[in-house]
Amino acid sequence: MTTPQPILRVEGIHKTLGDQLVLNDVSLTVNRGEVKILIGPSGSGKSTLLQCLNFLHHPDQGRIWLDGREFKATSRRELCAFRQQVGMIFQDFNLFDHLTALGNVQIALIKVKGMAKAKATHRAKEELARVGLADKMDLYPAQLSGGQKQRVSMARALAMDPKVLLLDEPTSALDPELIGEVLAVIRFLASAGMTMIMATHQIAFSATMAHEFLFMEKGRIVERGSPVHLLAPGATSRTMAFCAKINELSGDLGMAERRCASSSSALADKPQGGHGTT
Amino acid sequence: MNDYWHFFLNDVFPALNQGLWISIAVIVPSALLGLALGVLVGSLRVYAPAPVRLLNEVYVSLFRGTPLVVQLFFWYFALPHLQIGDLRIVLSPMSAAILGFTLCSGAYHSEYIRGALLSIRHGQIKAAQALGMSKTQTVLWVVLPQAMRRALPGCGNEIIYLIKYSSLASIITLNELTGIGRTIAKQTWRNIEVFVALGLYYLLLVTLATLLLQYIERRLALPGFSHARR
């Protein structure tokens, strides 16, 4: 990948919810194959930003380009076409409760893409196998664990062949022992060159594959840079301070800085701009 | 004793059986059309733009707020007097009954459907939209299949109720079960026997409907949707 190819670019996004300015002049660009990580305290606007990127929230102001074309939400048809190209993973999975794992992956292929049922079934099975759930496709959401549900929701999004995948704290609703299986899928996607923007608190994990960290606070991106840079030993970045605080809260008092530092030193041999998985 | 049997076998049963078919001919279309109308109205009351929603609210308050007898009288006796241009609608007792029951039960069904629609987690609607589904597709393929399962016990209740209020059709001269029962009773003066038999006919209908509804509920049951055990 020699010249960066912008897939999704937003400029000057503003969003007010109620009487609160949730997003204040946010701009970012994601190039093909890049992984961008949104971090920051809760209420900083990460989730709203992601939902603005596929118009689940309509931004009050700002411009959005997808794959070089500016998108204006003028008609519903265009809006639906746009959303098909921007996959979304939610914190609480949001699987369709009345459909099996297979049905969940299949339904948009059939109803939105107009795919024939046999073809959609084939594709859905492929996607489920890719996230390691080939043997679970006839189970309903109520019969799946949290980690399995999240993997189904990833298969569902990926089946639509999105140009970019938005992940809104994909592991935050999971029990600790289930986080790993979801992270493994995300890591696999990153290594396969999937373009992703992910809001997460899994800083050590995301540092191993992120091209850029975007630190949000009060509706703004207040800091951005490569994890190597922001989490370098002795760095005084906001990201570092936040990371230390998270680790502190999870009980590693004193260990915090070393933790952050070690996760970033693991990156030392990671080629910039590539998407290896260390 | 022999006299009783004679009376039932020769007078009561044959006449009531005839009425039974007419009752069924009123109940089945009213139940199906009423449910369809209820689903439509219930969905519009939740998802349609404000003016359409208001229109549906007016419909529901009108048909829930007036006695069914008055509604039937209106369709059968009053409607023929309304003339718009050259158009004058005169309904047969059967059509007037089906129309009245459909509109009335549709209003009640819509309330059960509305409640069920509101109980579906909003996240699923977001997920459907994120996949590129239109609003109509989302309601049709994601929300309604779940809402219908939740509304089924309530809607079933309304259908059971419809079976019994179908007896009101007799007062707009339809010779269904109750109408025929009243005629035999008047002719023979054997009120006890006739009305007990009539009651049993309705009990039979309701029991059959209950079994059918239970069967449907079981067929549609999915993991995570059980109402009984939780």
Image (cartoon, coloured by chain):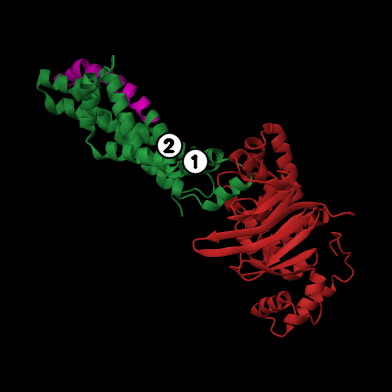
Chain colours: A red, B green
Q: Is residue B148 left or right of residue A81?
A: left
Instruction: Tell me if residue B55 comes above or below residue B226 in the rendering.
Output: above
Q: Which residue is mark 2?
A: B39
Could you tell me if residue B159 is visible in this image? no
- Earlier along the polypeptide chain: callout 2 or callout 1? 2
Residue B62, horizontal then vertical, whole percent: 28, 37
Residue type marked 2: Val
Give the quarter of the figure containing the N terminus of chain A: bottom right
> Would you say the residues marked 2 and 1 are in contact, meaning their CB atoms lie under 8 Å apart?
yes
Q: Out of B224 and B140, give the one closest to the viewer.
A: B140
Could you tell me if residue B96 is visible in this image? yes
- Image quadrant where residue A149 sits: bottom right
Instruction: Tell me if residue A82 comes above or below residue A146 in the rendering.
Output: above
Residue B147, horizontal then vertical, whole percent: 47, 43
Residue type marked 1: Leu
Range drawn in magenta: B3-32
Residue depicted at 48% across the width and 48% down the height: B226
Q: Which residue is mark 1?
A: B144
Residue A209, horizontal then vertical, whole percent: 80, 63
Q: Is residue B148 left or right of residue A269?
A: left
Which chain does the numbered disc 2 sit on? Answer: B
Q: Out of A224 and A272, give the one closest to the viewer.
A: A224
Instruction: Tell me if residue A255 comes above or below residue A276 in the rendering.
Output: below
Which chain does the numbered disc 1 sit on? Answer: B
Q: Secondary structure at mark 1?
A: helix
Residue depicted at 62% across the width and 61% down the height: A47
Q: Secondary structure at mark 2?
A: helix
Report the magenta stretch's main SS: helix
Residue A14, horizontal then vertical, whole percent: 61, 59
Same chain assignment for discs 2 and 1: yes
